[in-house]
Image: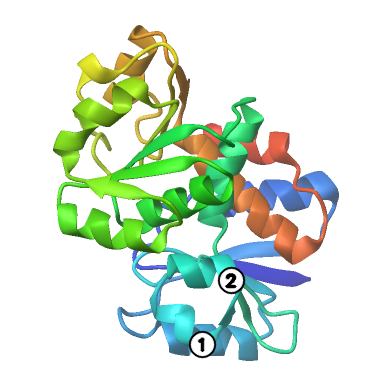
């Protein structure tokens, strides 16, 4: 039996175990998915211990996505983003990946939304914002990053090919002409708030909100009212998990089974 898992602190709220267990059951794979909660600052030691114990792969969540960079060989995208959320132990050295970025692009692909040649706005310059900005730029979009602390947006834009940046005040200028909008902040999580003024939303826009609790955030509700296409955050969560499963197993992820397991717990 292969063992996979998740390290983070805290991890009790994670929806990764039911998603991955559903995939194993759907494909008849003899494997288990468990969680580990190492102390803050001890993620590198936890990764080494997992490898020694024969764990086949790990997902990594907050606050350890940057901490593990020094104990794995990050693939180019993870290195550029500066964060690892998936580790594969099956090679000679642990390989680090960032499937959060894949979760963004596959969410749009699943909904039939083209990214190449589009104008995209990313709200937030933290971990999710970095993943979204690189993912969209690599897929051919022109990216504008808006963040409450403008200097963080400027720093991220300097690393993302062709990106521009500004404070949240730039949303009033950028969103009305954008094709894609991604909320990569936690604004709206379990609260009726939105980082984007309703008046700038329009019916030629596709809006992805990384928040998945609640599934219908205020941003998505107001975007729908404006005629925009909306994509809830559970899709991004799903597809980052599917990508991790595919890295570890070499098989196509059972999207429907994983999606059903995820949404049944939201």
The one of 15 and 61 positioned closer to us in this rendering:
61
Residue 265 visible to an observer of this rendering? no
Is residue 247 shown left or right of residue 111?
right
Mark 2 to mark 1 CA distance (whole Å): 15 Å
Dot 1: within a 10 Å radius of its alpha carbon, few (fewer than 14), some, or many (20 or more) residues? some
Residue 178 visible to an observer of this rendering? yes
Percent coordinates x, y for residue 7 in the rendering: 47, 70
Secondary structure category for the residue under label 1: helix
Percent coordinates x, y for residue 77 in the rendering: 56, 65
| Tally of numbered tags | 2
Q: Which residue is mark 1?
A: 71
**Image quadrant occupied by the C terminus:** top left
Q: Compared to 51, does 250 lie above or below?
A: above
**Image quadrant occupied by the N terminus:** bottom right
Percent coordinates x, y for residue 94 in the rendering: 64, 83
Secondary structure category for the residue under label 2: helix
Q: Residue 34's image quarter?
A: bottom right
Q: Compared to 235, does 40 lie above or below?
A: below
Q: Compared to 221, does 259 lie above or below?
A: below
Q: At 85% across and 52% down in the image, what residue appears?
A: 28
Dot 2: within a 10 Å radius of its alpha carbon, few (fewer than 14), some, or many (20 or more) residues? few
Is residue 28 shown left or right of residue 204?
right
Percent coordinates x, y for residue 118 in the rendering: 51, 32
Q: At 39% across and 27% down in the image, what residue appears?
A: 178
| Residue 219, numbered circle | none
Q: Residue 53's image quarter?
A: bottom right
Q: Residue 186's image quarter?
A: top left
Q: Residue furthest front?
A: 162
Is residue 143 shown left or right of residue 259?
left
Q: At 63% across and 91% down in the image, what residue appears?
A: 52
Q: Which residue is mark 2?
A: 76
Badge nearest the viewer, 2 or 1:
2
């Amino acid at each position: 039996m292969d063992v996979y898992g998740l390290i983070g602190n805290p991890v009790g709220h994670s929806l990764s175990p039911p998603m991955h267990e559903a995939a194993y059951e759907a494909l008849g794979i003899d494997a288990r998915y468990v969680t580990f909660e190492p102390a803050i600052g001890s993620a590198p030691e936890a990764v080494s211990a997992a490898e020694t114990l024969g764990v086949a792969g790990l997902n990594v969540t907050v606050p350890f996505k940057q901490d593990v960079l020094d104990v794995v060989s990050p693939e180019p995208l993870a290195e550029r983003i500066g964060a690892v959320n998936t580790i594969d132990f099956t090679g000679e050295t642990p390989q680090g990946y960032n499937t959060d970025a894949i979760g963004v692009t596959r969410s749009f692909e699943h909904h039939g939304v083209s990214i190449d040649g589009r104008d995209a706005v990313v709200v937030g310059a933290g971990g999710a914002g970095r993943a979204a900005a690189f993912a969209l730029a690599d897929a051919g979009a022109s990216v504008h990053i808006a963040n409450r602390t403008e200097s963080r947006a400027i720093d991220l834009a300097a690393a993302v090919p062709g990106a521009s940046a500004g404070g949240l005040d730039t949303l009033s200028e950028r969103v009305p002409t954008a094709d894609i909008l991604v909320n990569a902040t936690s604004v709206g999580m379990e609260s009726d708030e939105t980082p984007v003024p309703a008046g700038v939303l329009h019916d030629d826009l596709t809006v992805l909100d990384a928040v998945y609790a609640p599934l219908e955030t205020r941003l998505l509700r107001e975007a729908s009212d404006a005629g925009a296409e909306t994509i809830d955050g559970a899709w991004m969560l799903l597809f980052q998990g599917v990508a991790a499963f595919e890295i570890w197993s070499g098989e196509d992820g059972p999207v429907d089974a994983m999606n059903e397991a995820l949404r049944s717990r939201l």
